[in-house]
Image (cartoon, rainbow, N blue to C red):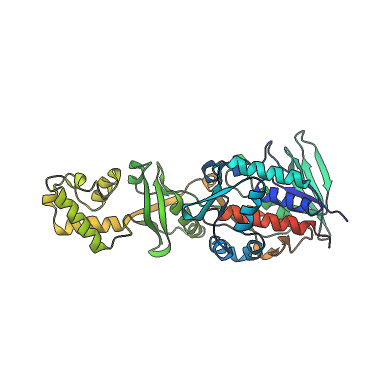
């Protein structure tokens, strides 16, 4: 008997769920509230779409600090190698860049979206845009259908055997991520772990990061301290902005910062090791050599080979020394202070940027209420979840999109099964 499936949300999870379900013989309708599908996908990876990470199942799980173990089954059945092969068959070659980040070879996110649209349509799924699902209807613990508000505002009941909620989270609301999936799941009895933005830039108390806005630091070590205790450390690239800091390693650490802020008002600090490859002794020797090389100049002019020009004044001032001071006047203790500041440049977090600036959503449908091998609700038969609507979230580097594709693939396949 052919099953009728409705997938809510035409993002990466929704498209692959619809295509997989249709390819298994189900009659699938993919409903999208926007006039065009995949709007959030198009802006991922700065428009280049970092859709996975070139690692194995254990690496994928490790890249998802938000309930990664829940995804072990999904990743085992559809991992990053399967995903790359999937896109290759659809004509999208891929390439691996720094941090094992995988992008389409063209570097154009639209190529990924076109491939997903083609996959869903070729599989037989029907895409309907401008269709907002208001409620999922269930009776006696089983899905009956959905109530849809079409573009003309009229409500319509669509009967189905299974519903896959793939509506995303709460960030980038302009792309359609309005949190509707959380409401629908809650109406059906599911517990919703409070949604919050993750992978989000941080605002700083100190004003000096704003003075160097636009400056990128590469190959630095950032350590997040909460009430004096280390809660995370990341190596890589960061960016100073008009409000504070951003960039890959800051976004990764922001998850711990956001978690710490949920129930308290802790003192949160970021300590940046600008020269992690050098020990304190090696760095002091390097500074001494540079001072000797520029003996007749100011501290500011003598550090141009070691530190980005725009950061020199900040480093020296944080060390409590005038950048106009001549190196011949610098004491050994002052030189050591400069080195210690380079190894531990510290500023404090005032808060997170607005929720809509977060890359992904942490929180969502409680994973304890979802069968990890099928992505089916343990409470309502025929109800499935995929992607960001689930309480899962990962680091930067393609992990979150891989999770969306893997959960969508499993949800589509499971929903199509005749049981």
Q: Quarter of the image containing the N terminus?
A: bottom right
Q: Quarter of the image containing the C terminus?
A: bottom right
Instruction: Compare residues 132 and 113 and report the one nearer the observer.
Output: 113
Q: Is residue 146 left or right of residue 246?
A: right
Q: Residue at x 71, y 52 (%)?
A: 17
Q: Quadrant of residue 334?
A: bottom left
Residue farthest to the right, as pictured: 1
Q: How many marks?
A: 0
Q: Is residue 166 left or right of residue 242?
A: right
Instruction: Compare residues 379 and 74 and report the one nearer the observer.
Output: 74
Can the viewer see residue 244? yes
Instruction: Compare residues 320 and 419 and report the one nearer the observer.
Output: 419
Report x, y in % for residue 244. 40, 46
Report x, y in % for residue 210. 36, 42
Q: Residue at x 57, y 49 (%)?
A: 94
Report x, y in % for residue 37. 67, 40
Report x, y in % for residue 399. 56, 56
Can the viewer see residue 40? no
Q: Residue at x 73, y 38 (%)?
A: 129
């Amino acid at each position: 008997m052919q099953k009728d499936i409705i997938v809510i949300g035409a993002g990466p999870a929704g498209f692959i769920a619809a295509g997989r379900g249709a390819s298994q013989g189900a009659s699938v309708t993919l409903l999208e509230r926007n006039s065009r599908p995949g709007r959030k996908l198009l802006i991922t990876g700065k428009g280049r779409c970092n859709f996975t990470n070139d690692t194995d199942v254990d690496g994928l799980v490790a890249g998802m600090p938000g309930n990664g173990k829940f995804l072990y089954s999904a990743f085992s059945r559809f991992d990053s190698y399967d995903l790359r092969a999937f896109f290759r068959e659809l004509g999208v070659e891929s390439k691996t860049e720094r941090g094992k980040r995988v992008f389409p070879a063209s570097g154009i996110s639209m190529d990924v979206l076109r491939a997903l649209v083609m996959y869903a349509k070729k599989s037989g799924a029907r895409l309907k845009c401008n269709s907002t699902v208001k409620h999922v209807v269930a009776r006696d613990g089983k899905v009956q259908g959905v109530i849809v508000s079409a573009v003309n505002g009229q409500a319509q009941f669509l009967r189905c055997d299974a519903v896959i909620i793939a509506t995303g989270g709460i960030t980038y609301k302009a792309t359609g991520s309005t949190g509707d999936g959380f409401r629908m799941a809650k109406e059906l009895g599911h517990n919703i772990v409070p949604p919050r933005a993750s992978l989000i830039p941080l605002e700083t108390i100190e004003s000096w990061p704003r003075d160097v806005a636009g400056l990128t630091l590469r190959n630095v070590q950032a350590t997040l301290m909460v009430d004096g205790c280390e809660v995370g450390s990341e190596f890589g690239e960061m960016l100073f902005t008009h409000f504070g800091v951003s960039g890959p390693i800051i976004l990764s650490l922001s998850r711990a910062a956001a978690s710490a802020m949920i129930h308290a008002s802790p003192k949160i600090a970021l300590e940046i090791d600008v020269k992690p490859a050098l020990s304190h002794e090696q760095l002091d020797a390097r500074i001494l050599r540079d001072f000797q090389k520029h003996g007749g100049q100011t501290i500011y002019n003598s550090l141009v080979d070691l530190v980005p020009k725009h950061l020199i004044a900040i480093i020296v001032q944080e060390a409590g020394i005038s950048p106009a001071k001549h190196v011949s006047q610098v004491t050994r203790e002052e030189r050591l202070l400069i080195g210690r500041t380079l190894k531990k440049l510290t500023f404090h977090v005032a808060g997170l940027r607005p929720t809509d600036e977060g890359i992904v959503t942490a929180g969502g449908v409680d994973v304890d209420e979802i069968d990890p091998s099928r992505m089916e609700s343990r409470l309502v038969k025929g109800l499935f979840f995929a992607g960001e609507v689930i309480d899962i979230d990962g680091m930067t580097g393609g992990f979150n999109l891989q999770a969306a594709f893997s959960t969508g693939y499993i949800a589509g396949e499971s929903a199509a099964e005749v049981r």
